[in-house]
Image (cartoon, rainbow, N blue to C red):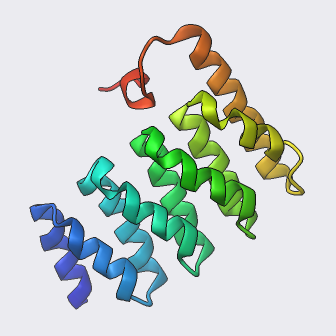
């Protein structure tokens, strides 16, 4: 409960370091997943290095999945390299799937090669996510003029 109270306070003050510390020190899967989501919200592009580290090094696939999702939601090309690495090498298909989906959300053409290779992944969910992401990148190339997924995305 003490960590949850700290998370509430850190959320209100946008204390990125607190959430990075939770990710490095907490054993609770639930708290680490929660910390990834909040870190992405409070840190935005500043937290891309921390989320990339979680994606590539956290012992739990669900936490790595959430890091991939968060990088896709941030939508900046700085997330491409760690997402491509995870797509190529993570042993868990849920992480590879989410990495492929996040690359499609970011929408950079430099992800096409790794996504094309993922069309041959042994897991159907990963193959489907790669195909959907390649379609999204093609669509964005043809119909969008924005420089980043964040600029292209409709905002309320």
Question: Front-most of 73 and 86?
Answer: 86
Q: Is residue 40 above or below residue 133?
A: below
Q: Is residue 64 above or below residue 45?
A: below
Residue 137, relative to residue 133: is it above or below? above
Residue 43's spot in the image, x, y percent? 26, 55
Q: Is residue 51 found left or right of 90 in the rendered image? A: left
Query: Which sits in the foreground, 47 or 38?
Result: 47
Q: Is residue 121 left or right of residue 9?
A: right
Q: Quadrant of residue 57?
A: bottom right
Residue 134 drawn at (x, y percent): 71, 30
Quarter of the rendering occupied by the C terminus: top left
The image quadrant of residue 11 is: bottom left
The residue that appears at 44% across and 87% down in the rendered structure is 28
Q: Residue furthest left?
A: 13
Residue at the image position 67 percent from the left and 34 percent from the top: 133
Q: Nearer the viewer, residue 11 or 89?
A: 89
Q: Residue at x 31, y 62 (%)?
A: 39
Residue drawn at (12%, 62%) of the image: 12
């Amino acid at each position: 409960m003490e960590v949850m109270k700290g998370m509430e306070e850190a959320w209100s003050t946008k204390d990125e370091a607190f959430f990075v510390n939770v990710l490095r020190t907490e054993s609770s899967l639930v708290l680490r997943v929660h910390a990834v989501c909040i870190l992405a919200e409070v840190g935005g592009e500043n937290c891309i290095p921390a989320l990339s580290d979680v994606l590539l090094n956290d012992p739990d696939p669900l936490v790595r999945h959430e890091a991939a999702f968060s990088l896709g939601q941030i939508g900046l090309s700085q997330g491409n390299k760690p997402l491509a690495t995870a797509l190529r090498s993570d042993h868990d298909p849920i992480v590879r799937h989410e990495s492929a989906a996040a690359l499609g959300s970011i929408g950079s053409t430099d992800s096409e090669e790794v996504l094309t290779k993922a069309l041959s992944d042994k897991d159907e969910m990963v193959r489907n996510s790669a195909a959907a992401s390649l379609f999204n990148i093609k669509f964005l190339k043809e119909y969008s003029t924005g420089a980043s997924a964040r600029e292209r995305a409709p905002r309320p």
